[in-house]
Image (cartoon, coloured by chain):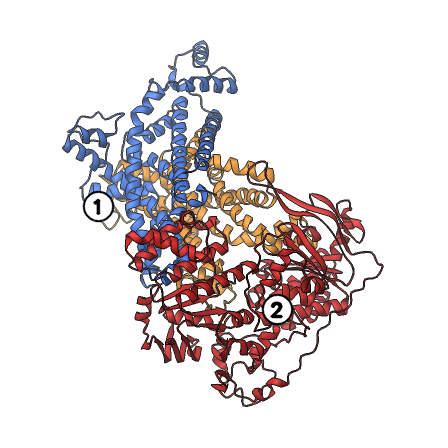
Chain colours: A red, B orange, C blue
Amino acid sequence: MSTVLEFNNVSVNVKVAGTEVALLRNVSFSVGQGRILGLVGESGAGKSMVGRVLSGLLPSNLRFASGEVRFQGNVLTGRDARAFLGRRIAFIPQEPLSALNPVLTIRQQMFEHLKHLKIPRAQWQSYSVARLAEVGLPEPEAMLLRYPHQLSGGQCQRILIAMAFSGDPELIVADEPTTALDVVTQAQIIRVLREVQRRHNTAVILVTHDLRMAAHVCDEVAVMYAGDVVERGPAATVLESPLHPYAWSLKNATPSLEGPQYVLPTLADLMPGLKDMAELKGCRFSRRCPTRDEVCARTVPVLEQIVDGHFVACAGNCRAQAGQRQPELHVLPEPSISAAQPLLEFREVSRVYQGRSKGTLFHALRPLSLTVRPGELVGVVGESGSGKSTVARLMVGLIEPSDGEVLINGLSRASATAAQQAEMRKVIQMVFQDPDSALNPRRTVERLVTQVLDLQPGITPQARREAAERLMNQVGIATDALHRFSSQLSGGQKQRVNIARALCMAPQLLVADEIVSGLDVSVQALIMNLLLTLNRELGIAVVLISHDLSVIRYLCHRVLVMREGYVVEQGDTEAVFSNPKHPYTRTLLASVPPDDANAVWPREVEVV
Amino acid sequence: MSTLAATSSRSSVGAWLAHPKVLVGGLLVLIFVCVAVFAPWLAPNDPNAQDLLATLLPPMWDEGGLAQYPLGTDSLGRCVFSRLIYGSRLALLVAVVAATGAMVLGTVLAIIAGYMGGMFDRVTSAIVVLWMAFPPVVFSMMLMVGLGTGVVNVILAVVLVDWTRFFRVVRAEVLVARHREYVYAAQLLGFSHVRIMLAEVLPSVAPLIITLFSLQMGVAIIVEALLSFVGLSVPSDVVAWGVMLADGRDQIYQAGWNLLAPVCGIIFAVLGFNLLSDGLRIVLDPRLKKRGSDA
Amino acid sequence: MSSGIVFLLGRKLGSVVLTSIVLSIVVFIVLRMIPADPLGMMLSPSATQADADALRAALGLDKSIARQYLVWLGQALQGNLGESIFFRAPVLQLLADTLPATLELAFVSLFMALAISIPGGIILYKLNGKKGEVLADFGLVLLLSIPSFLWGIILIIVFGVLYPVLPFMGRLGSDFDAGGAGQFLLITLLFSGQWSAWWDALSHLLLPALALALSFSPIIIRVLRSSLLDTATEQYVMVARLRGQSEWRVLMHHMLKNAALPTLTLIGVQFGFLFGGTLLIEVIFSFPGMGNLMVQAIKNHDLPLIQGVALVFCLMVLTVNFCIDGLYAVLNPRLRNA
């Protein structure tokens, strides 16, 4: 087996405020023919930078500082890389729907690529059909004549995979190919990718933030943090027993779907940005590392082999402590399922919309009945288009039901007076998904969290300040952030400000609509633990809307599984997840990469 | 791909002025305003005083020119330089008042239509589409025929023709802001619609409105010049650049410089407003600032 | 093409008709706000009140506005747009005589504008981030600040008076047959083989068309450049590069096709300005087109003529917008098969 690609101590620098910062620092790895290497890391780790180096399309302010890249044994220059693009080194992009030109048909784009590959014109049609069939697309001839906007994300990604494998490249870089897709589609695409890869015996670099997925799909995994490779080894080993403290917290920050649950470890602070990296001379993880000692901040860690093929870069003595970390078991707080009146009740609530052409109706939500009692933690899980967001909006009153009743504390919202509705707003509040859109960029954090106090004319600036500080403490942000604007906050901080704003009303029920999707795993853990704390200490009930099953398992006693407006299954989370009855629930569960590295994933599941 | 953007800084007034377009445009506008305001002190002669013995004199640096008439005289012996200066008064008046009128009318309707949606939006949008089928030049001329001449009517004509510019652009922006989650959040907190429109939506479209306002002032000057060129604007005792253009056009072979003064005046003022508008647009919208340095 | 397009365009056609009718009402009403009395022009100083009343009745001006409108509409639908008070000729005839000239002017200037602005937009886009950009940008704003009638005057001074290379009056020089009313000179002269006359007609068109083109181009350049900048950041452009496509191909094949869409929309919106611009240009260049006719009609308070010309202007704008909408639907697959 030959080595297709080698990175030997590669460093790429960028100029920041006069000094040079290494975006990639002494990165070393190799990929053999027919093997898959996973590059795992959160955003800002530098994993995408590897792809950029390979494409030869480095922006002008970046400099290749040291080390060498070897492709098929020969040193790779920027010019070579560009010449190989599409032919010997191919890429599979992240957002399939926007990666295809919207005004050209699939055929036009495919043919353009085949021309570039110097395939004879006479063969274009048959070749394209064969490639599309290979990735499992039905009716490839018809598919060729379509436009991208007529296709789903999964279909587009299959086409992009087909195009990448056209011409039999020696190396493929797949940059987060499934991140923008639904969970079930993700599993399907991964399966397709692996099948085609095996058939062509291509070397693949899979860039992802999902350690579990990488462990199941890849032969070898390299975990990256702030431009360093912190751990590298056989995929199953790295998942089962990660040695580096960052890899360990990465693995454990995603709650598991089976077996006992542990409290999610949270790391203080954030992955260093460019400015911070300029100051960190030694180990870049040391500031957040729970096992650091004073040598860490001074020494640049180097990858060392621990056992066969398993490398760790750590300056301290964490390796010795690796096996000694005992996570504590996680137990959900008991909800007060008293005889008390339910906070929120749906009685056969449904929501229908007028379709675009006359006469068609779009059922966003089929008749649904549910109750949420004080202190409960309820999850609503489903893919996009399942109706879960509609449920959230119906709960808080942003939209009205087409049929059925929504009751807050026993009182129907539809028949409530204005004063009663104002009271209802104090009971149930919502935290929105997109913190960029949910926070007015022109307001300071203080004004944002205390926004509701604008309605109380008599409030003094002093009282306002105190309220703001109290809220910030509740969500765990330093009070000096109060005078900042939302654009100056990190994603996790923005989301917490979002929560704080909802808390200002002292609600009894929080509806959290996909509030952790799009956040880094470590930040996700923070937010989830915050919600748990709020529930435990203040008794706030939470309805969590998410597509992420493991998050729901961690946070919720009860779960509703939704699909295309229907609730296909509901019940106690443990019961539903360990013994799913509905085929869709089974498909959903099977689409999540399991914790056990030896389990087979993705499996062939019934397509519902 | 990982982002390399540096953190953006809050723009202060100092940062505003630092942008070259704002600086230059602002300077031009300032000069224009000063000339208009201080016209009586700046002009050497009475712009309407006719000196029939000294018609079509060349500028003073040319042979035959007089120092008394720095840019020469027109066919009725009136001082071109003074007329140029006094003409700026009319231009400024029309610019400011008409732009304000168009802005208020267009913006108010746009915010209500964009935010409330429904029948109001459909009706106003249909009206605007109709309105815009009229070539503006034709429309404004017709309005002047219908309303009669005079400064007030000119201003009215500009407002009636151009409010649609504000409406279309502001409404599009309002529609975007309307669906931002912070508007929903405000609704959930119990704020009334009017309050949300004023406190959340209006500030987010304010930069756009300011930009359009400056642009509109330039447009108003052009429309006024156009109307007075065809004699549909102001009575003959009011000095207007367009009238100077019309006069000069008739004398183009004998006294071409009579044309240059109003041409330069119009271009100067409109350029100032356009530069200012452009610069403000970039300064006030942080997204556009990064345009130049994208790899 | 799907039935979707046909349906879409059919609906638009319907709205064009409806819009025309509504606009005719608006024109009618606006002009009736007039304080001046058209009759004053037509009566001799010694006319009595009885004469005035008789004339008024003959012209139908004694009826209510609504009635007058319906009379007018009925006549218009039969092809009779009334008679010009000043010229004492049927409005329709006057329009037919002058419309071709204006259309020729408009299309030649549109052609010139595109020839200037498409390369201009691409060049300006390529300059992005480079040294020349600031200068080019300022230059663009300067060009934007010069309306068409000023361009006309500048061009006359430069190319008509100072360096007299091109004629700037009328459609044809005095050497040639001063006909040409109601004809598309560029076409008729070409087909009848009168080369020198054809060249003369063309050279008379050059300056006015250039004036219009120069006022139109900066706007198109601007929107083309900003659409190109927008497209450049789209994922599919990056992905095409990663597939190894050359920069040239990426620009021409992928980006331009997408950037053309908003540019096309803008051209449609601005066309109204272009047509309105012909008005003053024709006056400045003494070009015997509809715009010149309109200005004369306005000076004479010639209501039927003003109405007729205003309507035709609106109809032309609507027609052009209709064509552009159709073109847009053809080019944008998302509208074709939703």
Q: Chain of mark 2?
A: A
Amino acid type, residue under disc 2 in the picture = Gln
Q: Which circle marks residue C81 in the picture?
A: none
Residue C320's place in the image compared with A150, above or below, is: above
SS at mark 2 in the image: helix
Nearest the camera: A202 or C12? A202
Query: On the image, numbered disc 1 is attached to which residue?
Result: B64
* Chain designation of label 1: B
The residue beneath circle 2 is A524
Label 1 amino acid? Answer: Gly
Counting from the top left corner in percent of width and height, residue A186 is at 53, 61
From the viewer's perspective, is residue B292 above or below residue A522?
Answer: above
The residue lying at 51 percent from left, 88 percent from top is: A298
Residue sitting at 56 percent across and 78 percent down? A247
- In terms of depth relative to the viewer, which is nearer, C44 or A598? A598
Q: Is residue A166 above or below residue B149?
A: below
Q: Nearer the viewer, residue A561 or A343?
A: A561
Between marks 1 and 2 in the image, the one whose residue lies nearer the viewer:
2
Residue closest to the eye, A556 or A426: A556
Is residue B25 something one can see in this rendering? no
For disc 2, the neighbor class at 10 Å (few under 14, some 14 to 19, many from 20) is many
Task: Answer left or right for A194 relative to C240.
Answer: right
- Same chain, labels 1 and 2: no
Q: Quadrant of the N terminus of chain C?
A: top left
Image location (x, y in percent) of residue B173:
52, 49
Q: Position of residue A132 (x, y in %)?
A: 41, 55
Which image quadrant for residue B244? top left
Q: Position of residue A207 (x, y in %)?
A: 47, 69
**Mark 1 burial class by Cα count in 10 Å: few <14, some 14-19, many 20+:** few
**Observer able to see residue A590:** yes
